[in-house]
Image (spheres, rainbow, N blue to C red):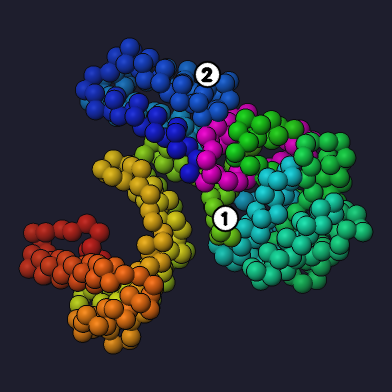
Amino acid sequence: MAFEGLAERLQGTLQKIRGKGKVNEADVKEMMREVRFALIEADVNLKVVREFVKTVSEKAVGSDVMKSLTPGQQVVKIVKDELTNLMGGEQEQIKFSRKSPTVIMMVGLQGAGKTTTSGKLATLLRKRHNRKPLLVAADVYRPAAIEQLETLGKQLTIPVFSRGTDISPVEIVRQALEEAEKEHHDIVIVDTAGRLHVDEKLMQELADIHELSSPDEVFLVVDAMTGQDAVNVAQNFNETVGITGVVLTKLDGDTRGGAALSIRSVTGKPIKFVGVGERMDALEPFHPERMASRILGMGDVMSLIEKAQDNVDEEKAKELEEKFRTQSFTLDDFLDQLQQVKKMGPLDELLKMMPGAGKIKGLENAQVDEGQMGRVEAVIQSMTSKERTAPEIINASRRRRIAKGSGTTIQEVNRLLKQFEEMKKMVKQMTNMQQRGKKRMKMPGFDSFFK
């Protein structure tokens, strides 16, 4: 993910000061020198870097910190708070119109990911806000954009309003608004044309669409990998069409993250959403405080909980609790859990949301083998129903058959069966301990299973 290098540098720098019983001005000066280098290396705007370093330095050498019982931790908190403020402070919600439909204009340069992001945003608004979106193909200069949006619409079962390339974008939007009213769509997302650079014709067209549709939101879609150029693009569009927010795409790529840390400060416009992958559900509302926590290695528990709530079936979770209690957990249940975890996104990203995961030996640079999960699924799916319920019947000949059917090895089948048995034993031990001494022993993370 983005911020990889910055996170590593900042976490290393802050670790030196975190545990100090006494902190003096020299300590703060040395720390801020490292922080300054880390931010510049991450391609953060120089003016933003200077302001950030000045603010943190002044607060860190204040009397409240110096006299504190835990000055090192106080300094870390100041860095986190200022990093949060730098990215906008609090999360900025999408503005919905009181009178339907809410109109959202998607603007930006060609190649930033406007069309894909339009589809992702429609998906998110339908899923989390129970809205009925209409996508509008208003990029008449790139026929592939219309086809791409129509393909996405079919894939997502979201209607797309298009009139080809022989009609002006302004007229397309006018007809789309009529269609939205007739079909009771409460969200209209207009995918506008982009250029390789900001030009007068593009801006005039956007201004005309803006005047006709009076959008509630104008989202500038910016490729995070363009670094400082992203900030310049944001300024240009804001001066001409008045953007209300920014959507940063490809924040999961090999990018230094400087744009995310600079845009709010330079343009005064909030980052409202971030693209964190290619999947159509890989668009997330931007939370400055959570992002600051992740950059500093403090995890992001709230986002992890939200992912679980979005993807884990509540009824199945209750059934699973009961199966743990009664020791009737089977390989079918194990497979079901595996598939629900996969829906939450890449495992290495989930790991980074866990507080302190970076400090666990071997996890700081963990490369999760997603293929291994696929092989485990294949092994279980190659078993008969009886074998999944009673794995103890799986003898040598059955293991050979399962390995052959799943395209794996006998060793991999053996490993899975062994891990499953060990997990069942561990849960049984926990159950027994909890029953023997509920008051004597608390088991974080498992209490909900043993009520």
Q: Does residue 367 sit above or below 87 in this rendering?
A: below
Q: Quadrant of residue 98?
A: bottom right
Q: Quadrant of the C terminus?
A: bottom left
- Mark 2 residue crowding within 10 angstroms, few (<14) / some (14–19) / many (20+): few
Q: Is residue 249 magenta?
A: yes
Residue drawn 29% across the image and 68% down it: 412
Dot 1 or dot 2, earlier in sequence: 2
Residue 447 image position (x, y, % from top left): 22, 63
Highlighted magenta segment, given as a residue range: 237-266
Residue 78 image position (x, y, % from top left): 39, 28
Residue drawn 57% across the image and 65% down it: 127
Q: Quadrant of residue 128?
A: bottom right
Amino acid at circle 1: Glu
Amino acid at circle 2: Arg
> Seen in the image, is 164 located left or right of residue 101?
right
Residue drawn 46% across the image and 64% down it: 343
Q: Does residue 395 sit above or below 77 in this rendering?
A: below
Q: Is residue 111 magenta?
A: no
Residue 278 is tagged as: 1
Q: Does residue 141 sit above or below 127 in this rendering?
A: above
Mark 1 to mark 2 CA distance (whole Å): 35 Å
426 or 269, which is in the foreground?
Answer: 426
280 or 86, which is in the foreground?
Answer: 280
Residue drawn 79% across the image and 36% down it: 198
Residue 416 image position (x, y, % from top left): 27, 69
Label 1 SS: loop
Q: Which residue is mark 2?
A: 50
